[in-house]
Amino acid sequence: MKFNSKWTRQHLIGIEELSREEINIILATAASFKQTMQRSNKKLPTLRGRSIVNFFMEPSTRTRMAFEVAAGNLSADVITITGNASSLVKGETIRDTAANIKALNADMIIMRHSSAGAPKYLSRVVDLPIINAGDGAHEHPTQALLDCYTLQENLKNIEGRKITILGDILFSRVARSNIWALKKLGAQVTVAGPATLVPKEFTQFGVEVCHDLRKALEDADAVMLLRIQHERQNATHFPSIGEYTRMFGLNKERASWLKPDAIIMHPGPINRGVEIDSQLADSDRSVILQQVTNGIAVRMAVIYLCMNASLQSIK
Ligand code: CP
């Protein structure tokens, strides 16, 4: 794999700061890595001898495992540290933990944290490449990148497509990162759901805010569903889960309002029978597991590009 010298970032903190060209470099690099993933021996020697620390302070299945598999596919050594099994519970600061990770010879930290801004802070106080694996309600950049990759795989082009993001937009880092990414790639983005979770203020990001589900789904090329993020809500934003499902859950009838070849996406974890009908989640229109697999190639690309930029800067 030839390193794209136009990529100069050691850190990936958010999509907001990326240009369209940078997003396309990641997607093109991921496409090359996806080809290598089809081989019987998936391992590339690219990062042999490098160590990557997965520093996860919040629960995760897909992101954590995809980063582990991605780093392993590049032959890096991977160490995972989880919040309640680290010395943070003994009062150590994140800054000191990160300094110790560096002293233990790590070459990169991948961080998930419940506080918005934690990966940005780490990138300022420790001299290692930092990848944001989700910070509070701020950003989840690799999720948006794998979503864009999956959209390109299925729709061929994103420019001019209508993409509807439906659900708990207010508390969603996935929504924020996807809004940045999709707008930069030229999509028409609609955010939909109850007014309490989809405030009008989102129009300032250049998206359409819609509280009429039929209007939001009609003519959409793809719908991205989001679960209700109870862990980030400190008040009730709708009467009950049953009420939410009745008003905004995607079922077979409502899915028929989409374009006939539209795809159904979800970053996971899904809550079957709440934001998505269980049969629909397993239907031919659902690309939910394709998104998960694409997450490996996209994270290989991000690790590879940021690690190389870091190594170039210390030459
Ligand atoms: N989509 C996503 O971030 O899933 P996990 O929380 O399981 O990593």
Image: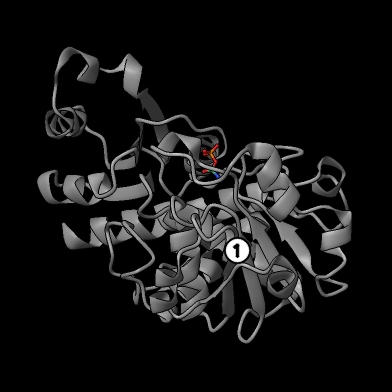
Q: Is residue 299 above or below residue 209?
A: above
Q: Is residue 283 left or right of residue 103?
A: right
Q: Quadrant of residue 225?
A: bottom right
Q: Is residue 199 left or right of residue 105?
A: right
x, y percent for residue 261:
85, 71
Q: Is residue 190 above or below residue 177?
A: below
Q: Which residue is mark 1?
A: 165
Q: Is residue 307 above or below residue 273?
A: below
Secondary structure beneath label 1: strand
The quarter of the rendered structure image containing the C terminus is bottom left
The reply to whether residue 81 is visible in this rendering is yes
x, y percent for residue 151:
67, 68
Could you say which is closer to the camera, residue 217 or residue 158?
217
Mark 1 is on which residue type? Ile
x, y percent for residue 235:
42, 39
Q: Quadrant of residue 109?
A: top left
